[in-house]
Image (tube, coloured by chain):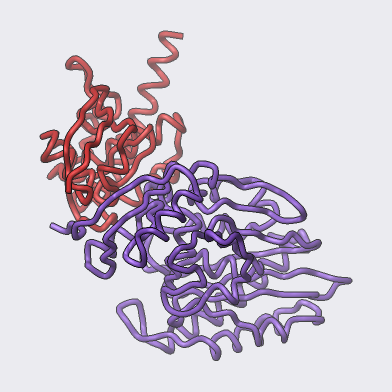
Chain colours: A red, B purple
Amino acid sequence: MTINVSMTVNGTQVSHEIEPRMLLVHFIRETLELTGTHWGCDTSNCGACVVRIDGQPVKSCTILAAMCDGHEVATVESLEVDGQLDPIQMGFHERHALQCGFCTPGMLMTTRALLDENPDPTDHEIRVAISGAICRCTGYKNIVSAVRWAAEHEAATANREG
Amino acid sequence: MQTPAAFEYERATSVDGAIASLERLGSEARVIAGGHSLLPMMKLRLANPEHLIDINDLTELSYIREQDGEIRIGAMTRHVDLLRSDVLAEHFPLFRDAETVIADPVVRNRGTIGGSLCQADAAEDLSAVCAAVKASVVIRGSGGERVVSMDGFHVGPFTTAVGAAEILTEVRLPVRPNGGSAHEKVERRAGDWAIAAASAAVWMQDGMIGDAGIALSAVGLTTIHVTRAEELLRGKAPSDDLYAEAGTIASEDCSPTSDGRGPVDYKRHLAGVLTQRALRRATARALHQEA
């Protein structure tokens, strides 16, 4: 049996016939062919698959695509707009916050959500926010530094424009 | 790749509608809330429901409010909301203690209190939290509602008093004067299940402990209600010696098994120490003396 699911993904309305058992991460990667979202541990431990549903970061390996019917999903592909990187992406670049890059999509979506809610997080608050995301390369130090870079960049930009 | 076995999916638009679906579909139907326990079990074929009834649209079950001398929490209230609730932290600070260390912030955006309690995993924190503060739960079926205490709610490992065609709709926490509570947990790494955890609540009366609640996570097949220690504490003046005695009872009355998180003697030791710490903090909070 298949069912029809419709949702907004990165601002675009999509509608597909899928099996109810299809997980959101596979719907995003295989049905929509948006392979920026990574599929890692499959057990909601590693955080590589984090996307935002109605603005909230969620592990897409542990939610059915059917449960997102009628909701708004944002993936890592939504960060860059018209060739302009999001400040969080710029921060990861500036502070060398990735090596192999596997965890990066989830880290970006998780920390973007953090900054949207808390524009000036402490190092501790950043570490708490990414406590559900595993990086085996960086030792996290540069990731924390990248998030701080993005926070400061955004504050400086707001000051210039304000 | 881990994918659940095939099932049919429907979305409930009302609690009564979900109950009607459960009755119609029979014992192979399950309700799904946050899904962060059920979906992993389905991936591993530990659960194989043929029908899932998604209750995430039932926002009327998402609330924390004071009513009739109780804090009432809707079953669909998510961990993140329990963590952030000031009214809950004011009356039952052990919720914030526990929610800070339940899974991780992203998982807490999805998981619900109703789902956690109905999963009844002995290693899960909220079952002990609710047992310690003498909570009761509202269970609704087509015949109406019943209110069940946590003692009656925990039937066995992963088994609760909620019937096949029933839904847990609300958790009720009686607010009594001069209360304090705390939850203490030791885990191997951020977001992991507890090696052991202890929840404690006390209600002071004329400088003495009038009543107490103690429950343990991850040191038995079910959440352990340490009733023998509760009896010990009633009517006694709070002291470190008394907490130590209660801790000794807790380490005796739990029944941990040896696994990757530690051997039995270590877990018994932890249960005792964490019980002492939780009692000390709960009492300090009740007396407004928390350091």
Residue B183 in which image quadrant = bottom right
Residue B137 visible somewhere in the drawing: yes
- Place of residue B115 in the rendered image (x, y in percent of width and height, measured from the top left): 45, 59
* Residue at the spot 52% in from the left edge and 64% down from the top edge: B126
* Residue at the spot 44% in from the left edge and 54% down from the top edge: B20
- Front-most of residues B217 and A92: B217
Q: Quadrant of the C terminus of chain B?
A: bottom right
* Residue at the spot 44% in from the left edge and 46% down from the top edge: A124
- Place of residue A81 in the rendered image (x, y in percent of width and height, measured from the top left): 22, 18
Left or right of A157 on screen, residue B134: right
The number of discs equals 0
Residue A127 higher or lower than A13, as above or below: below
Left or right of B174 on screen, residue A145: left
- Front-most of residues B115 and B200: B115
Left or right of A7 on screen, residue A22: left
Left or right of B175 on screen, residue B266: left
Considering every residue shown, the one lying at the far top of the view is A161
- Place of residue B106 in the rendered image (x, y in percent of width and height, measured from the top left): 37, 47
Residue A125 in which image quadrant = top left
- Place of residue A127 in the rendered image (x, y in percent of width and height, measured from the top left): 38, 47
Residue A67 higher or lower than A150, as above or below: below
Considering every residue shown, the one lying at the far right of the view is B206
Residue A59 higher or lower than B157, as above or below: above
